[in-house]
Image (spheres, rainbow, N blue to C red):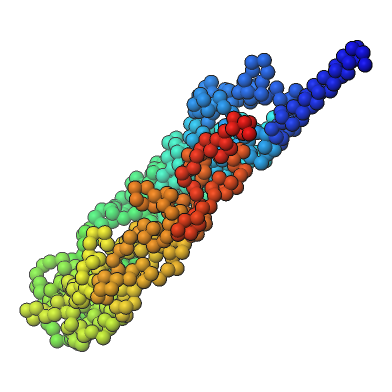
Amino acid sequence: MNAKAVGIAVAGLTLAVIAGVVWWESGSLTSPGPLHPSHAQVAELNGRDSCKVCHGDAGITMKAACIACHNPIQQQWETQTGIHGSLSTDVFAACSSCHTEHVGGSVQLVSDLSFQLSGIDQPKSYDHSHTEAFLLTDAHGDLSCVRCHEQAWSASLLEGQSRFLGEVQACKSCHEDPHHGELPECEECHGQSEPFKEAPNFDHSIFPLVDGHSIADCRECHESERFAEAPTDCKICHAEDFDLTLNPPHSAVGFGLDCETCHGITQWSDATYTHTDKFPLEGSHGELTCNQCHENAPDALAAITDATCAACHESPHGTQFVSAVPALLGVASFEESCSTCHDPMHVSFKRPEARMTPQQHAATGFPLVKPHDAQDCVECHSEIESDVDWAVLFPGRAAEDCEVCHGDPHVGQFENGVTQGTCLECHLPTVFQPTKYDIEMHARCPFPITGAHKAIACVSCHETENDLMRFVPTPTACADCHEDVHEGRFDVPRFAAIPTDKTGCARCHVTSSFHDVSWSSNEHELWTGFVLNGSHASVGCAACHSGDGPEGVEAFIIPDQACAACHQDMHAGQFEVRGVTDCARCHTETSFLDTTFVHNRDAKFALDEHHATLSCSSCHAIYETPGGPVTRYRPLGMECVDCHGDPDDIRGR
């Protein structure tokens, strides 16, 4: 073969090798993985030169390439607003640290990790702290993100769509304006904390909403919901009320429609009308309201002028007494008798010069029957011969008001109790003993008789001191009568009357039997600080409280509440800190397998998009110990060579 042929062969072989290298590099080395669906549907990001759009070319950084498409993010950074405006310079420059690409959508571009790296633990409970103009308070704090950000958790977005940016924060952008633009921004009147219809901040000072105008529904006056058109003249709204008013009948007596002449808008009942001279409002009549005299009368003025006392005033006397009055005073009828003894101008009635018969006395509501059938009048009305007020002489005592005349044999023990010292609550009207006080009545006092206490005699608790049986106060604490078998173990400040108002033994025990206790997991938490959740809720008391001393003394010593005090450490002390292993840092009481451990939050080695796809056992192997197999969690190397070896050693082999 001549030299020319050899040169042609060598050139052809060289071209083939170069073509193969180019194919191998483009097809095997420069394709880290598929784009996220949101980016994959952008035409510019598909094709031979698509990598340069994001990864830059001729000195353009990847950060600059991202901002070229996501300009609002750059605006946040420049104005130091929003989440991106709060990031440090290093974090803001490394877009890929929060937004993982080239994994085909298996990791979302905006994920929980994205929020956590920006300082937000839980995105769905984010309170808009970076957007001071629209913090999520009151009613808005209860909304889910998607109520305002429809694409918040979408798997992918179309070109031009946004997850969180671009929303308008004016009320009317989401809520219909029922006021048709007549009133200012909604929040000025309605706020965000109360129901919309209440408008707690609205100032109605142009027409005070007081007294009868303090209505809850604005539409009662603003029917068309055009608030500027509502009239303020009384007659516009209350003409019908004027025509139908009978107390007094305004139209019949000739009152005008200028309501404000007599009435105000703050207190309608405070009228300033000057009464007719035919019936001057003097004495007791000056304290009355119009309605008390002018009630449904055809001609109100004439009716009151001709009325007798009995037409308006109910007699304080009984029926039998009223019937006897005409003959007693020598008048034709009882209606004509009032002024015989009582002057209309008197502030109160004076007693008549009369002595009542037992029959008349019965008409007062106090019949003179046993045991009041033998008393003389002066025994009850001691000043009957004196010129004192009728109400003082004849106060209208009821037969049940024993304490008015009789001394209190209990010396006021029951005055502040449920009976208020009323004798007939416990005693019969005819005889003081025996009483009618029973267990049902005892239940009304602070110490109901229940359980074993029903078999105890009254004198066992109520002792007699100086001929006085002591009822109030009577000790009600269990320890006042019963020995404390716990020897004061629970009488310390930490075991106060919680969570109920019960004290002493009653905090746990009932009256039916000392061995019956009323104990709940809620009380266990409040008293001991140890919550009975998960598996602990189904464990019997003796599993933790197993003393060998006398009953009730040693059995309830508070045990060590650390997990390791009862449970074996399956991690062989790997997580021990200062001699203590705190299982609750990662595990819950519901199930040991349910953990709260988050690798990127709780471990020193953050899982990037490559390590996140590995199984735990890839890094944490099982090794044998004298106590059995244990999974290795720490210490572990965090350098690449610790798991993947030294690249130089690999190449050397």
The spot of residue 615 in percent (x, y) is: 60, 47
Q: Is residue 215 left or right of residue 148?
A: left
- Please name whichever residue, 383 or 360, is drawn nearer the observer in this view of the structure: 383
* Image quadrant occupied by the N terminus: top right
Q: Residue at x 44, y 36 (%)?
A: 203
> As drawn, which residue projects farthest toward the front?
1
Q: Residue at x 55, y 43 (%)?
A: 124
The spot of residue 606 in percent (x, y) is: 53, 38
The spot of residue 42 in percent (x, y) is: 74, 29
Observer able to see residue 446: no
Q: Is residue 170 left or right of residue 426?
A: right
Asked if 366 appears above or below 83 in the picture, the reply is below
The spot of residue 178 in percent (x, y) is: 59, 39
Observer able to see residue 543: yes
Q: Is residue 114 left or right of residue 526?
A: right
Q: Residue at x 18, y 79 (%)?
A: 461
The image quarter containing residue 484 is: bottom left
Q: Residue at x 42, y 40 (%)?
A: 208
Asked if 550 appears above or below 348 in the picture, the reply is below
